[in-house]
Image (spheres, rainbow, N blue to C red):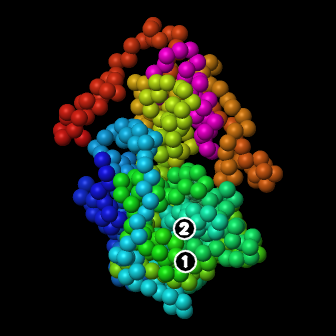
């Protein structure tokens, strides 16, 4: 199935059509929009929200949040049937993702982003909505889910990924690269090493396929625009930025063009900013400054906001990283994987499989643990347990795992400086690893024939009941 929306505002209409949109008038930029977003993301129906009539903003300026936080809307953004169960939707994505054909963008002269222009002296970032997302954030952020576009000066490769953008005054923002391996950081350094600033375009209010693409771990040299084209099954329409020549998505809501000044020669203190763990990871830190030389926006522009929220709330309601883990397990030769999921904002991983041999579950767990960024818990369950359903997973843990036999601890594994449990002293010394607990919550392989039979419905049976009786009970 192809994606059937043409841009962010069209996606919002489709979200409205399935009853998932809520409109909020009059919420303030200073923490109120962020607070409402966080509370709404924690509700069981997890609505997307369109904020308008924002105090201090020109009429018509809007902010859209929780775009793809629910599983249904994450599926819609990928063009996957949103009535599938979350696990079936993730399986459909995993299968499609492994066979995607990249599609290069196509230049167009139909350019809604140029409807309104602020250039040179007229540039004033205060005329666009930049929320303070969490109460103790260091300032307003126009970019919480915005794409940062840069062009490699040697190969012409264009990278478009999500890095947060803090607004400092009318004409200056900072871009935060978590580490030097980010493609945006690698490319800007190539300009800085020649003593030049790096031309940048920041795209706020992009097509959801570009939002997803900007989060993907694509290899160096690969274009997120091509990947978004693959998701959509059609080229992304682009138009060269008047100042940078970068292939800017033509239907974007808001675009900033400018120059990212050589770092660390030039910098501003950035943050702090609430992280996806639900904590602040650091105090203010120096970040490179972008001088904004032009702002473009559509009439009645919509900022796509995607602040990190207290777990389990996460930007994407389908576990995209779990889908890659699922593919990795298969690529490593582990058969019979029935599903993979991540809970608590990626901090806990669950793999379900049909056990074929003793050690099968642990083999999968070890690979999953190795790839579990910042997580501390990896659980393996049998195929009758839905890994996307935390209550089901805990049922397996409490009825199939014997702690004295089925728990292993892996030490000194992959985490990061964002991990709140690592002491400041260790972090400062570069010790940013954690340990991981593997819980084998599968029925012990040697007891599988004599294990008490479950009285519960199988996953297939309960899915079938939902299919047949949804109207009555759903
Ligand atoms: C909503 C959102 C916000 C993000 N914010 C940042 C950020 O501020 N800094 C950062 O380095 N990565 C951030 N990321 C992660 C990167 O976008 C992601 O890892 C991406 O794959 C990096 O792309 P690259 O390989 O082209 O550098 C964010 C991701 C999302 C979905
Ligand atoms: Mn990239």
In which quarter of the view is residue 26 placed?
A: bottom left
Mark 2 vs ligand 1: CB below 8 Å: no
Given residues 126 and 81, the one toward you in this image is: 81
- Is residue 399 at least partly visible in the picture? no
Near mark 1 (Cα within 10 A), the count class, few <14, some 14-19 or many ≥20, is some
Relative height, residue 279 to residue 82 (above, below): below
Q: Position of residue 193 (x, y in %)?
A: 75, 70
Of the two numbered discs 1 and 2 on the same chain, state the one appearing first in sequence.
2
Q: Position of residue 281 (x, y in %)?
A: 66, 57
Mark 1 vs ligand 1: CB below 8 Å: no
Q: What segment is highlighted magenta in the picture?
A: 352-379
Q: Which mark is residue 149?
A: 2
Q: Which mark is residue 244?
A: 1
Label 1 or label 2, whichever lies nearer to me, is 1
Residue appearing at x 61%, y 69% in the figure: 175
Instruction: Determine the quadrant in which ligand 2 lies.
Output: bottom right
Residue appearing at x 78%, y 51% in the figure: 430
> Is 397 included in the stretch rendered in magenta?
no
Contact between labelled residues 2 and 1, with CB atoms less than 8 Å apart: yes
| Residue situated furthest bottom in the rendering | 121
Relative height, residue 309 to residue 245 (above, below): above
- Is residue 286 at least partly visible in the picture? yes
Q: Which mark is residue 376?
A: none
Relative height, residue 292 to residue 263 (above, below): below
Provide the secondary structure element on which disc 1 rests. Answer: loop
Provide the secondary structure element on which disc 2 rests. Answer: strand
Judge left or right: residue 216 versus residue 72. right
Judge left or right: residue 285 versus residue 172. right
| Residue situated furthest top in the rendering | 450
Residue appearing at x 24%, y 41% in the figure: 474
Given residues 218 and 37, the one toward you in this image is: 218
């Amino acid at each position: 199935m192809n994606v059937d929306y043409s841009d962010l505002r069209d996606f919002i209409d489709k979200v409205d059509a399935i009853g998932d949109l809520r409109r909020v008038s009059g919420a303030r930029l200073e923490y109120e929009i962020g607070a409402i977003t966080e509370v709404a993301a924690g509700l069981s129906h997890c609505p997307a929200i369109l904020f308008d009539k924002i105090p201090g903003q020109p009429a018509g300026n809007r902010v859209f949040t929780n775009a793809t936080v629910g599983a249904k809307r994450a599926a819609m953004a990928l063009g996957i049937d949103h009535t599938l169960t979350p696990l079936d939707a993730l399986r459909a994505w995993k299968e499609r993702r492994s066979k995607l054909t990249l599609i290069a963008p196509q230049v167009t002269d139909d350019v809604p982003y140029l409807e309104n222009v602020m250039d040179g002296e007229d540039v004033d970032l205060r005329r666009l909505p930049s929320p303070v997302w969490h109460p103790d954030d260091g300032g307003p952020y126009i970019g919480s889910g915005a794409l940062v576009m840069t062009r490699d000066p040697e190969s012409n490769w264009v990278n478009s990924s999500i890095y947060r953008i803090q607004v400092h005054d009318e004409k200056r923002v900072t871009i935060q690269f978590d580490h030097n391996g980010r493609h945006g950081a690698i490319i800007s350094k190539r300009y800085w090493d020649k003593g030049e600033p790096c031309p940048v375009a920041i795209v706020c209010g992009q097509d959801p396929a570009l939002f997803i693409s900007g989060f993907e771990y694509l290899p160096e040299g690969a274009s997120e625009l091509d990947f978004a084209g693959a998701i959509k099954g059609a080229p992304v329409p682009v138009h060269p930025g008047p100042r940078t020549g970068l292939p800017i998505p033509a239907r974007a809501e808001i675009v900033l063009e400018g120059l990212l000044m050589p770092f660390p020669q030039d910098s501003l203190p950035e943050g702090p900013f609430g992280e996806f763990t639900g904590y602040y990871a650091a105090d203010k830190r120096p970040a490179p400054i972008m001088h904004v030389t032009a702002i473009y926006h559509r009439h009645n522009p919509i900022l796509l906001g995607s602040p990190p929220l207290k777990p389990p709330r996460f930007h994407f309601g389908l576990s995209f990283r779990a889908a890659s883990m699922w593919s990795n397990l298969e690529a490593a030769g582990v058969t019979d994987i029935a599903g993979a999921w991540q809970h608590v904002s990626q901090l806990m991983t669950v793999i379900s499989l049909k056990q074929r041999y003793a050690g099968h579950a642990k083999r999968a767990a070890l690979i999953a643990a190795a790839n579990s960024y910042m997580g501390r818990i990896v659980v393996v369950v049998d195929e009758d347990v839905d890994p996307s359903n935390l209550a089901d997973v805990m049922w397996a843990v409490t009825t199939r795992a014997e702690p004295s036999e089925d728990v292993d601890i892996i030490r000194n594994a992959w985490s990061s400086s964002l991990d709140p449990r690592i002491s400041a002293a260790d972090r400062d010394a570069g010790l940013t690893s954690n340990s991981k607990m593997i819980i084998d919550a599968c029925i012990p392989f040697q007891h599988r024939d004599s294990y008490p039979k479950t009285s519960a419905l199988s996953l297939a049976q309960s899915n079938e009941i939902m299919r047949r009786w949804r109207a009555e009970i759903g």
